[in-house]
Amino acid sequence: MQAQLASRGSPAVSIVVPAYNAQDLVAACLQSIVPQMTAAHELVLVDDGSRDRTAERAQAVFDERPGLRARLVRQPNGGVAAARNRGLLEARGTYLCFLDADDLLLPGALAALDRAIAHHHPDVVAWDFLMWHPHKERKTRRVALGYAPGQSVTGRDAILSPFFAHRHMYVWAHVIRRAIYAGLPQPVFPPGRAYEDVAVLSRLLSECATMVHLPLPAVAYRQHAASLTRAISPAWCLDFALALRQVKSTFAERGASQALRLFIDAAACHFYIGIVKNSYQLPWAQGRAARRQVKEIFLDSLFHAPGQVLDAMASGTLPWPDPARERAVARQVRLALGDSLGFALARAASRRIKLWQRMAAA
């Protein structure tokens, strides 16, 4: 299959790497990809208006392999969503694999992907990854997506229920047919919005009838000390909440079983409490206003009444991957929705302490 695709001039897989001011990391990213590439692969790096030497260092890697099907595309800065959208336009592969410019594609990933595609011809290939702490390797851990190892999965609920139950909503952990991206309203990734993966990936998977899970860590997802201290803004909170509402809109339109709707609502609860906790990094009045807006959006993003969802999470109605975690999140969401002063004071103190600790470690 790979030889036939290559001979027609169309690669089997396009690897798309959006990059912005990544001069210190982009070469390592690309050097993790190019040794694995064959005639069945292409590599597209989208330089999103970098102000440093990102493009120069990427081109240097490409120049070392003149026979490589790789190209550098440059555009004015528009953000990661705009860079991914440009990559979609440039890619010619049957399947699309995204990788961020600060991450690594682990050895053997493309060969395993090729075998899965040749044998199963699925709509999507999902693979595990590493939460990679390059400066504290002992903290690096493998993350499994929640599917049975090596399992071929058929049907929307079978694909989406583990997706929402485990909440690993990373586009780079899912290699999807380009035709499915092309079938979505354009642009696929909403420009200027944070957490576009949450809404976009669930929509993409809703169009997939078949999945193959590769039980190997294929991507090393870099954890930056600096990213842990990023500034949280009201816009960040609202963007995340709006992504949850978009998920509901997608599945209200396309239809979803009651069980799947409950998994979606539980995932929304996990993300909601994450937004609430992060909002305590904001000044008190600003954070309170953001939480009020996020609460309204969150409640509108649920298929079920909030009490019904929280009772299901606490009682183990569905096969949650971590029942204790579900109970804890359900309890926290109840407190947040009830505007508990004790919860608010505890979260504010906890966020300040964690922020100081992370800044000291950075």
Image (cartoon, rainbow, N blue to C red):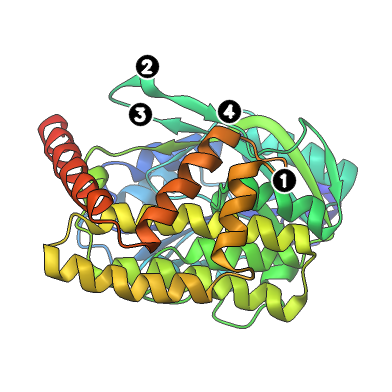
Circle 1 — which element?
loop
Relative to residue 302, is residue 259 drawn left or right? Answer: right
Q: Which mark is residue 253?
A: none
Q: What element carries label 2?
A: helix
* Residue 263 seen: yes
Mark 4–mark 3 Cα distance, whole angstroms, equals: 18 Å
Q: Residue 213: image x %, image y %?
A: 75, 40
Asked if the residues shown at circle 4 and circle 3 are in contact, with their CB atoms under 8 angstroms apart, the answer is no
Tell me, yes or no, whether the two marked residues, 1 and 2, touch with CB atoms within 8 Å: no
Cα–Cα span, label 4 and label 1: 36 Å
Q: On the rendered image, what quadrant is the C terminus found in? A: top left
Q: Name the residue under label 4.
A: 107
Amino acid type at image mark 4? Pro
Residue drawn at point x = 25 percent, y = 43 percent: 228
Q: Which amino acid does label 2 sit on?
A: Arg
Q: Residue at x 67, y 41 (%)?
A: 316
Question: Which numbered disc covers residue 133?
Answer: 3
> Any mark on residue 318, and which?
1
- Residue 244 image position (x, y, % from top left): 51, 68
Q: In which quarter of the image is residue 223?
A: top left
Q: Mark 2 points at which residue?
A: 138
- Check whether the beta carbons of the residues at disc 2 and disc 3 lie within 8 A of each other: yes
Residue drawn at point x = 20 percent, y = 41 percent = 350
Count of numbered labels shown in the rendering: 4
Q: Residues within 10 Å of mark 1 (few under 14, many from 20)?
A: some
Q: What residue type is labelled 1?
A: Leu
Q: Is mark 3 on a helix, strand or loop?
A: loop
Q: Of marks 4 and 1, which one's residue comes earlier in the chain?
A: 4
Residue mark closest to the camera, 2 vs 4 = 2
